[in-house]
Amino acid sequence: MVQNYEQPPIEKFKIMKTLVIKFLKRFGWELVRINAKIPRENFELLAKSYEFEISKSRKLIGLNPRRYKLVGDLIGTTPAEAYYIIESLARTMHLEGDVCEFGVAQGRTSGLIANELLGTKRKLHLFDSFTGLPAPSVKDELIDDIFGLGAISAYEGLMSVPSKEVMKVLDTLEIPKSAVVIHPGFIEDTLRNSTELPRKVTFAYIDFDFYEGIFAALSFVDEVSIVGTELIVDDYGFFSSGAKLAVDSFLQSTKTNTWICNVAEQVNGYFALLTRIS
């Protein structure tokens, strides 16, 4: 006689939890208990100490009471990289020009940047398809399979977040709508068709993941930037080979001594900082 075996409820729960975690991870989300206690006080103390060292040794970035929470809530961006963004924004604050983010995802980094721009005349331009990643090119080879999908082609369409969700993040921070310009669509189409492109850019955060989008963003900023403009390109040497190849190709295609490039130590994250010097 064959008996039907039914898994105990606790085992069913564990299996379901595992499936939910894997599903959410594919789209860049994380499952956290509602009553989980995050040591915000300790993080804030550490962040204040880090800011003190930055302001003492490099650039006065100023106090910002909402900054600690925004840095702590970032997804896919390390706190160290976040402070590179904050410091670059502070260094370029005296320059007349707008700020761009290429690749917005959930809008967490958008919120961080917008918060730093409050009280200034600089507009924040957000470029994203809002329908997920494009198809990778032949120059995009998988380096780090972050979602365990087995092939880089499987990432097409992932990381899709509607623009209204990004605006909810900015609305929560009471960012004036007049200070933000949304550019929906893949970057190549936007650069051809948009009538609201910034005429001058003095800082940009580029997180397009794949070669073609990153190279297009770099080429555009090169045309509208001035001496002192700073760019941070995320995922340099991580996830797809396209990010590093795009930066290297861009630097080779520009005039000699136009940009200098510094690659972050891996302890800080995977990104490159470009500064226009001529």
Image (cartoon, rainbow, N blue to C red):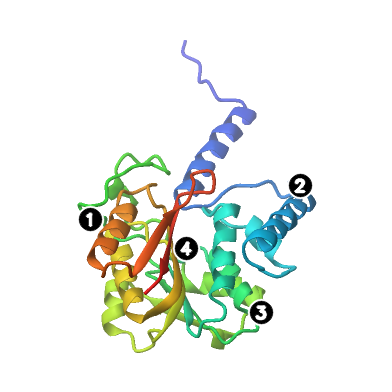
**Dot 1: what SS?**
loop
Q: Are marks 3 and 2 in contact (CB under 8 Å)?
A: no
Rounded to the nearest angstrom, the CA distance separating label 1 from label 2 is 42 Å
Q: Nearer the viewer, residue 240 or 128?
A: 240
Q: Are marks 1 and 4 in contact (CB under 8 Å)?
A: no
* Mark 4, residue position: 105
Q: How many marks?
A: 4
Q: Are marks 1 and 3 in contact (CB under 8 Å)?
A: no
Q: Are marks 4 and 2 in contact (CB under 8 Å)?
A: no
Q: Is residue 210 left or right of residue 123?
A: left
Which residue appears farthest toward the left when viewing the image? 138
Q: Nearer the viewer, residue 185 or 260?
A: 260
Q: Nearer the viewer, residue 39 or 93?
A: 93
Residue 86 horizontal/vertical position (percent): 59, 66
Q: Is residue 3 above or below residue 259?
A: above
Which residue appears farthest toward the right when viewing the image? 41
* Mark 2, residue position: 37
**Residue visible at 60% across and 35% down?**
13
Instruction: Compare marks 1 and 4 and give the one earlier in the sequence.
Output: 4
* Mark 1, residue position: 137
Rounded to the nearest angstrom, the CA distance separating label 3 from label 4 is 19 Å
Q: Are marks 3 and 4 in contact (CB under 8 Å)?
A: no
Q: Residues within 10 Å of mark 3 (few under 14, many from 20)?
A: few
Rounded to the nearest angstrom, the CA distance separating label 1 from label 3 is 38 Å
Residue 155 horizontal/vertical position (percent): 34, 51
* Mark nearer the viewer, 1 or 2: 1
* Mark 3, residue position: 174
| Quarter of the image with the C terminus in it | bottom left
Rounded to the nearest angstrom, the CA distance separating label 1 from label 4 is 20 Å
**Dot 2: what SS?**
loop
Residue type, numbered disc 4: Ala
